[in-house]
Image (spheres, rainbow, N blue to C red):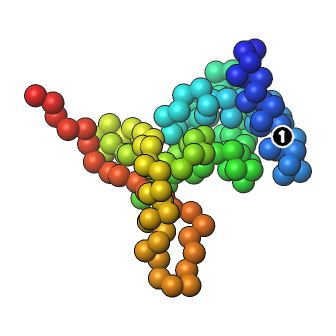
Amino acid sequence: MSGLADSNTDSLAQRLADSGLRATPQREIVYDVLLHKRDHPTADQVFTRVKENLPGISLATVYNCLETLVSCGLVRQVNLEREPTRYCPNLRPHAHFHDEKSGATHDIDLPPGLLDRVKSVLPLGYEASAVEITFRGKTKATR
């Protein structure tokens, strides 16, 4: 196991322990799948990838693992209108771009201070605990 993989496993174990849970092989593999290919997979896509290393795992177990990772703050859910929920391990403030043609979802880094400026437009007495920005469109054709 590489140093990065060890670090991710340690981080996972600590975050789960802080939530009163323990790291299981299933949770570790689901988390590793999300970190390895950061393409915002659906639960079904995670299930397919996890089965390669853990053939006996069920879809229900994958859903439970994803729910646990979200509740522990290790992964974010990305909801795109009527599409299946996707999962994102990038916890830094960022936006998403959803390519309507390919179906791919990409992380978009935001300029420093942008989220504070967006929150500042809230009516007096309101406070946002989270802001989600999603761009939808397609890649421009190049000439």
In which image quadrant can residue 130 be found? bottom right
* Residue drawn at point x = 68 percent, y = 40 percent: 62
Residue 63 seen in the current view: no
| Kind of residue at badge 1 | Gln
Q: Residue furthest bottom?
A: 124
| Closer-to-camera residue (75/91) | 91
Q: Vertical placement of 84 versus 45: above or below?
A: below
137 on left or right of 9 = left
| Element under disc 1 | helix
Q: Quadrant of the N terminus?
A: top right
52 on left or right of 139 = right
**Rendered location of residue 128, percent (x, y):** 56, 70
| Closer-to-camera residue (71/96) | 96
56 on left or right of 96 = right
| Closer-to-camera residue (44/112) | 112
* Residue drawn at point x = 33 percent, y = 42 percent: 99
**Rendered location of residue 28, percent (x, y):** 75, 32
Crowding at dot 1, Cα within 10 Å, few <14 / some 14-19 / many 20+, comes out as: some
* Residue drawn at point x = 86 percent, y = 49 percent: 18
Q: Residue furthest left?
A: 143
* Residue drawn at point x = 77 percent, y = 36 percent: 11
Residue 138 seen in the current view: yes
Q: Vertical placement of 62 versus 124: above or below?
A: above
In which image quadrant can residue 36 be found? top right
Q: Vertical placement of 100 versus 12: above or below?
A: below
Total marks in image: 1
138 on left or right of 79 = left
| Closer-to-camera residue (134/44) | 134
**Rendered location of residue 6, percent (x, y):** 77, 23
Q: Quadrant of the C terminus?
A: top left
**Rendered location of residue 97, percent (x, y):** 38, 46
The residue labelled by disc 1 is 14
